[in-house]
Structures are given as structure tokens and as C-alpha cells.
Image (cartoon, helix red, strand yellow):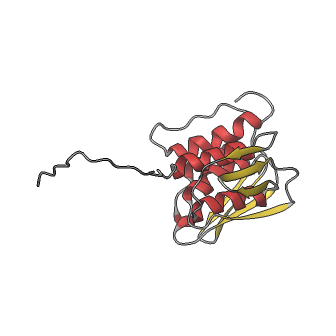
Amino acid sequence: MAEVTYRPAHVKGEVRIPPSKSAAHRALLSAALCKTPCRVGPIDHSADMEATLNGVCAMGGTVKAEENGVLCIAPGTAPQSVTVDCGESGSTLRFLIPVASLTGQKVTFVGRGRLMERPQTVYEKLYQEQSLRFEQSSAGLTVEGTLKSSEYELAGNVSSQFISGLLFALPLLAGDS
């Protein structure tokens, strides 16, 4: 490995560190589920962030782009039937599945690439235990019914996205979970 030496010099400027995409997804959904409007920023706009924002809007929320971020307003009444295009964002899909089940409505998730081939067995098992609709195919994933307050157990080796998705939804249910 070559050694590099820097001589002291006066350097001036700004370095912008892009925010974590994972943290931005979580911040956006936290804001969207608040009872009062919340601002989130800065965020880097990307296809994945747009998928999450569009999902919030599809389920009745409002999102307004601002100079340094986004203003999120909690969903009102969800439409009778919703389709959420997750693009290629696994985070969007895994975070929004339990959130969709707060509405009790039929929500279908679609995506591109191999997104719908990714296993969602963690949620599938939970939905079966609660007798809720959970159907996954290469064309999309549909959930229907309302999650119930309960004790939830997940294996310690599952993606934190599954845990985060439940943590977004469970506090909004009637009763303790």
C-alpha cells in the first residue's frame, strides 16, 4: 500500500453528507403517521424515497415537497381499494405492509424487478395467525383486514425492516401489543 502525505494547507469549503436512506424511510413514515403535520429533512430524493412517499399518498396521506425536505400529513380515510407501487424498494414494501393493515382495506403492492419474488414469510405467518388476507405472487402482494393487538414474536435473525414495519403499526392499534 502506498503512503500518502498531506502537507498542511488552508482548506475551506463545505461537504454535504447524504442522509441515510434507511433512516430517511423511517423518518418519513414516522412523520406520515403523526396526528399533526411533520417536516422531515434533509432527505435525498431517490426512486426508493419517492416509492415510500407515493405509498403514503396512496393510503390517504398528503406529502408536500419543500426546499429542504418534505411535509407529511397523516392519512385520513383510506380509499376502499389501494394499489401501492413500491418500484424496486424492499424497504417501502416491508415498512408499508403492516401500515396498510391499519386501514382494514384491501391493499395491493406491486413492484418492478425481482421485488415481488422477495420472501415476506415473516408477515405471511403473522397474517395467517390473525386470519388476515395475505397473498403473494410474482404480480404483486395483497393484504386485507386489520391487524389486532397481540403479542408478536419474530426470530432474531430477520431483517430490521420487518420489525420497523410492525413498530410503525402496533402503537396505532387499539390495545397493547
Of the pair 175 and 78, the residue shown nearer to us: 78
Residue 35 rendering spot, x and y as whole percentages: 81, 39
**Residue that sits furthest to the front in the current view:** 10
Residue 41 rendering spot, x and y as whole percentages: 63, 48
Q: From the image, which quarter does the N terminus lie in?
A: bottom left
Residue 130 in view here: no
> Which residue appears at 63% of the width and 72% of the height?
139
In the image: residue 171, left or right of residue 26: right
Rendered view: 133 above or below 173: below
Write down the quadrant of residue 82 in the picture: bottom right
Residue 77 rendering spot, x and y as whole percentages: 88, 52
> Which residue appears at 65% of the width and 53% of the height?
68
Write down the quadrant of residue 120 in the picture: bottom right
> Which residue appears at 20% of the width and 49% of the height?
6
Residue 156 in view here: yes
> Which residue appears at 59% of the width and 42% of the height?
164
Residue 173 rendering spot, x and y as whole percentages: 77, 36
**Residue that sits furthest to the top in the current view:** 176
Q: From the image, which quarter does the C terminus lie in?
A: top right
Of the pair 87 and 7, the residue shown nearer to us: 7
